[in-house]
Amino acid sequence: AHLDRITAVDGRIKAFLHVDAETALAQARAVDERRAAGERLGPLAGVPIAHKDVFTTADMPTTAGSKILEGWRPPYDATITRRLREAGLVIIGKTNMDEFAMGSSTENSAFGPTRNPWNLDRIPGGSSGGSSAAVAAYEAPLATGTDTGGSIRQPAAVTGIVGTKPTYGGSSRYGLIAFASSLDTPGPFARTVLDAALLHEAFSGHDPMDSTSIDHPVPPVVEAARRADVAGLRIGVVRELGGEGFQPGVQARFNEAVELLESLGAKVTEVSCPHFTYALPAYYLIAPSECSSNLARFDAMRYGLRIGDDGARSAEEVMALTRAEGFGPEVKRRIMLGTYALSSGYYDAYYGKAQQVRTLIIRDFEAAFEQVDVLVSPTTPTTAFPIGDRVDDPMAMYLADLATIPSNLAGNAAISVPCGLAEEDGLPVGLQVMAPTLADDRVYRVGAAVE
Ligand code: GLN
């Protein structure tokens, strides 16, 4: 049914970069046979899933939305990919994304934009916009994403679905094409909070192949999503993430969600996190710095595209020609920013300062979580904006992640759940719930109560 749905709508939505119907059907039949043979399978066995094209898959191409990886076949599965297969999930295809996960609209994909199923002239969010659109358009019930600065929560918010950024280190980065390694976090997309929790549980947990993986049991996210009870829970509304700069319809739906939580027995207070205002500038030094280093591996020698390989040129020239042709403008902008910020003489002023700000943001969270159990805010300042609107204005594009970035810098858990439609444009609004490191279950508890 999902493959039929893809055939019917994906020509317009363009959520997928690659669909492998035959393999998917064969895998689904294999699950059926195991079940028929009496094998006890997990709750997601046989369920189709759309997989962000940033995770390596040994049986499908992996592009990270970039021309530089066109035609590359990874020799191995990412840990997340492997765990999806072990859970019996059927990977129906790979989804579109901003090149190397840099963006908030999927317009930075080298393969063209994905469209928002609610309104085809609007963006589906990014960078995991193919995944959010696939789930919102009923092309898949579940999808994977990665969240470095908001790339799961923001697309979930603007397409009216659920998306979680787990605690950093709670989900493996092995086989995830790196953008900013200290921030990159794989997580689930689904149409319900419980579905997201089931997927979260299925692919999370310690991975010895990832040096920053946390060796700790997966928080009880499924139990929390089933419990859906907030009586007595202390909820803090972040003063700095709302009001001015937030679309009235977004703020209105958020305020109603908070009132709903209060009526369900939560104790709501306002909490100030004064350094959150500096999260965006700190992120745009840290993330490009890490990306400039991570993307050095695309050197025309090891992967995908190679230009000018006629034997007469130097290795440097082949690398330069390939990188000039293979990377899009946003990726080049980030490499230049990051290289500059890390260069000697500027390192202390930019990268070093940004790391200090990161510490202040972590302290804001620590102080807040002494007063409350979770923090809430609107996920994004606006609903889905029109395709083309911000693509030439990087600063406007970056603002989409104003409210999501603090959790990435601190490495704690956060979710976005739908909380209604803005009256101005009839488009979905997301409620963000943030919890301390390894308290991922709390964001599901609150999310499920609002749902
Ligand atoms: N939009 C942010 C950026 O462009 C976040 C992207 C992400 O989370 N991968 O960096």
Image (tube, rainbow, N blue to C red):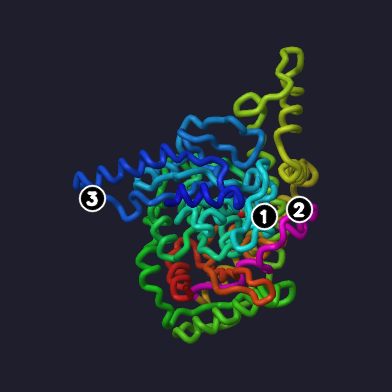
Element type at mark 1:
loop
Magenta stretch, overall SS? loop
Element type at mark 3:
loop
Element type at mark 2:
loop
Q: Name the residue under label 1.
A: 105
Task: In the rendered view, tell whether residue 264 sits above or below residue 118.
Answer: below
- Tag 1 and tag 2, C-beta contact below 8 Å: yes
Q: Using a 10 Å C-alpha cutoff, classify the residue at mark 3 as few (fewer than 14 neighbours), some (14 to 19) or many (20 or more).
A: few
For disc 3, does the CB lie below 8 Å from ligand 1? no
Mark 3 vs mark 2: which is more N-terminal? 3
Query: Residue 94 at x, y = what percent?
Result: 52, 43
Instruction: Give the Cα separation between the discs numbered 1 and 2.
Output: 8 Å
- Tag 3 and tag 1, C-beta contact below 8 Å: no
All told, the count of numbered labels is 3
> Which numbered marker is on residue 182?
none
Is any atom of residue 168 visible in this view? yes
Q: Mark 3 points at which residue?
A: 40
Mark 1 vs mark 2: which is more N-terminal? 1
Q: Is residue 377 rendered magenta in the image?
A: yes
Tell which of 73 and 185 is nearer to you: 73
- Tag 3 and tag 2, C-beta contact below 8 Å: no
Q: Tell me the kind of residue under disc 2.
A: Val
The span picked out in magenta is 373-397
Instruction: Give the Cα separation between the discs numbered 3 and 2.
Output: 49 Å
Query: Residue 129 at x, y = what percent?
Result: 60, 53
| Residue at horizontal 53 percent and vertical 83 percent from the top | 268
| Residue at horizontal 58 percent and vertical 62 percent from the top | 159
